[in-house]
Amino acid sequence: MWVKRIFNDKKLIWLVVVTLLIRLFSTNPSWIEQYYTYGVYPNIVKALRLLFGWVPFPVGDIVYFLAGLYLVWLAVKFVQHARHRNLKHLDWTAILKQALNTILLIYILFNVLWGLNYDRQGIAHVMKLKVDPYETKDVLRLTSALHQQVNYYAAQTQHGQRMALDNDHDIYALSIASFKTASKRYPFLA
């Protein structure tokens, strides 16, 4: 039977088990917060910054784009292969195993490297903020108020001060210093 042939692949079984464990783990935001966000994720971020911190664009986006291209390439390869052979003679089990392996691997990498952050409790919970429901008009009003403040302070800023903000290295250093200062009051920002 084809199901038995698919699941005799140990790699695929391992990927399915890890995927199920990730899904189970992600159902509990407090686990995510405790074990992922403040547990393993800081080490993942340090390693990724060490490897890719010098790159001036988001490497993760490129990797996800390439993964998508790989899936499209597999589909094109499948269609080309299907043209040359009768569809009845294709090894559907091998095709399904390869597709499942690829999709599950992408899913696991995405979640381990970043995606579990979407399931965390969030900054409102960490800061014990009461978040009221809001509507689009509230967001527009806030955006307008912030826009007015930015324009006001931009007009008060000297040209030389503004030019200093055009240097990415200086902005990066300033943001690190700001996070260090804020983390004294809010340790979770460290």
Image (cartoon, rainbow, N blue to C red):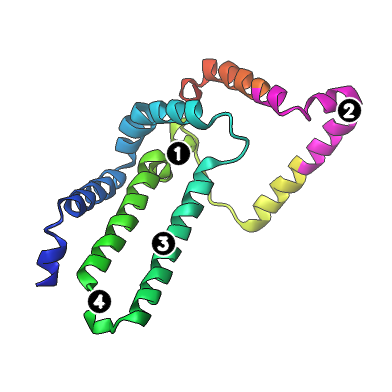
The answer to whether 172 is drawn above or below residue 105 in the figure is above
Disc 3 secondary structure class: helix
Report the magenta residues as a range. Answer: 147-172
Quadrant that contains the N terminus = bottom left
- First in sequence, mark 3 or 4: give its number: 3
- Location of residue 170 (image quadrant): top right
Spatial CA span between label 2 and label 3: 52 Å
Q: Residue at x 78, y 27 (%)?
A: 165
Q: In front: 141, or 84?
A: 84
Q: On residue 71, which mark appears?
A: 3
| Figure disc tally | 4
Q: In front: 140, or 130?
A: 140
- First in sequence, mark 1 or 4: give its number: 4
Percent across and percent down for residue 102 are 33, 56
- First in sequence, mark 2 or 1: give its number: 1
Spatial CA span between label 1 and label 4: 48 Å
Query: Per the image, is 153 magenta?
Result: yes
- Identify the residue under disc 4: 90
Q: Are marks 1 and 4 in contact (CB under 8 Å)?
A: no
Disc 1 secondary structure class: loop
Percent across and percent down for residue 179 are 58, 22
Q: Nearer the viewer, mark 1 or mark 4?
A: 4
Q: Amino acid at mark 4?
A: Leu
Q: Amino acid at mark 2?
A: Gln
